[in-house]
Amino acid sequence: MKKFFIYSLFVLYPCVFVFHTALAANSCPAATPAQLNELIANAKPRKLIFFSSWCSDCLVHLNAPETRDDSIVFIASFDKPGRAEKTLDKLGLQVKHCLYDNGITKLYGIKKVPTEVDLPSFQNVTR
Amino acid sequence: MNFFVRFFVSFISFVHAIQALGCASCGSGGDDPLILYPNESFKYYLGVSRAGGFKTLDPSGKSGIDGGPQFKDTYHLSVGKSINESAFVTFLLPYLSNRKNGEYKTSTGDPIFSLRWTALMPNIAEPLVPQVQLLFSYKYALARSLYDSQYPRNLLDVFGNGFSETRIGLDVFWGMREWKYGFAHTLQMPTARYFPGAHVELGLGMRSTVLVGFGQTQWGKVLMGLNREQRDQTRTNGELVSQSESFNYSLFTTADWIVAPLDAMIRATVSRRGLEGFHNQNTGQSVSVTLAWMQALQ
C-alpha cells in the first residue's frame, strides 16, 4: 500500500498532469498581418476574436459555445507572449486557431479587447 | 511662538494633502489620477475639482483657526504614455485657484511625475490572484508655499507645501470580478529645505488605502474607499517639533462611466477629508468634488 502511494505520488500523478497538459495545450504563435491573411485564405474562418489574458470581459467571449467552432481565429493582443496559451489552458479551452498579435491590431486599428470582427467586414477594412 | 509653530505645521500638512484624489487603477496608492490599461499607449486626463468647507484641526483634533481660502479650485491636466504592456509613465500638472470673499489668486501647482509597473498582471483564468502594481512618483515643489506667501492675511497665494517629495508604493487590486476590492500603501519621503533662518525637514509620510466597489466593463464602476495618511514629526534646525505628527482619515466615492465610442471615461469623485469619528491631528477638514474626462488617443 505504501509502495503504491509512493508510486502514484511520484510517477502516476506527474504522468496524469503531463497528459492533461498535453491535451489542453494551446499554441498561439506570433503572426504578422501577412500571416493572418494567409491563414484566412487557407482556413476560411468566419470570425476573429481579439482577446487578452487580463481582460475580464473577454471571458464571456472565450466561454461562449461558439468558441468551439473551428472557424474562429483567436488573436491574443496587448499581452505578454505566452500568457494567452496559459490562460486558455487554465480555462480548459482548446481552440484550433490562436495567434499572438505581431502588428495586426496596429494595422487594422483594433484598440481594445474584446473585439469581434466578422471576417467579410474585416476583409473590407483591409482593402 | 509655540502656537505659531503648531499652526504652521497644521497648515503645512493641510495644504500638502488638500486634494483628495479618489482612486487610480483603481488602485489607489498614487497621486496620479490617470491609469493606462495595457491596450492604451497614450491617454490624457482633464479634471476640475472644487474643495471647500475647510477647517484646520490642531494636535488634539479640535478645530483651529483657518485663515486660508474658502474654496480651492483645481484644474488637472495629466498625460500618460505606456512603456510596454506592464509599465507606463504619467505627468500631472495642476493649476489652482484660491478664493475668499471675492478675491482670488491662481497659480500652477506642484507637478508630479509617476511611473507604474505592473509586477503581477491579473488573469481571467485566476480571478483570485490580484493585480500588483509598484509605484514611483516625484512631486516637484514648484508652487508657492506658506514660507513664501506674500498674503499672510488670507494665504490666497499658497498653492503647495513647499517640499519636493519622492513616493514609492504598492497597489494591490482584485478587479476581475464584478465586486472589486483592493488596498495600497505609499511611502512619502520629502526633501528637506532651507528657509531663511531655518532648516525644515518634514517627517516621512505613509498613506494607506482600502477600497471596495462594483463594476462592469460595459458601463464602468463605483468604488468607495478609506484613506489613512500619517506623517512623522517635523524637524526644524535638527530639533523635533513636539506634537507635529499628523493624521488624516478621508473617505472617497468614485463613479466611472465608460463612453465606449470615444474610448473615454467620465469620472466623478466626492471626497471628505478629516473624517469625523477618526483620529485626525494637525490636518484639515474639507469636502471636495471632482469631475474628470479621460480618453485614450492611441
Image (tube, helix red, strand yellow):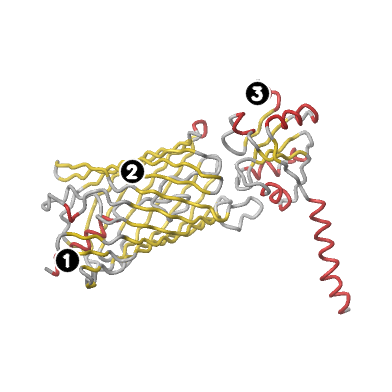
Q: Chain of mark 1?
A: B
Q: Tags 3 and 1 in contact by the CB under 8 Å rule?
A: no
Residue at (24% x, 55% y) in the render: B162
> In 3D space, how far apart are the residues under numbered discs 2 and 1 (Cα atoms)?
30 Å
Residue A15, quarter of picture? bottom right
Asked if B162 appears above or below B92 in the picture, the reply is: below
Q: Give the camera-side residue of A92 and B9.
A: B9
Name the kind of residue labelled 2 in the image: Leu
Q: Which mark is residue B289?
A: none
Q: Residues within 10 Å of mark 3 (few under 14, many from 20)?
A: few
> In 3D space, how far apart are the residues under numbered discs 3 and 1 (Cα atoms)?
69 Å
Q: Which mark is residue A126?
A: 3
Q: Give the camera-side residue of B14 and B90.
A: B90
Residue B190, quarter of picture? bottom left
* Mark toward the start of the polypeptide (2 vs 1): 1
Q: Tags 3 and 2 in contact by the CB under 8 Å rule?
A: no
Q: Residues within 10 Å of mark 1 (few under 14, many from 20)?
A: some
Query: Are labels 3 and 1 on one chain?
Result: no
Residue at (34% x, 52% y) in the render: B139
Asked if B214 appears above or below B193 in the picture, the reply is: above
| SS class, disc 2 | strand
| SS class, disc 1 | helix
Q: Residue tagged by mark 2? A: B93
Q: Position of residue B74 (x, y in %)?
A: 29, 43
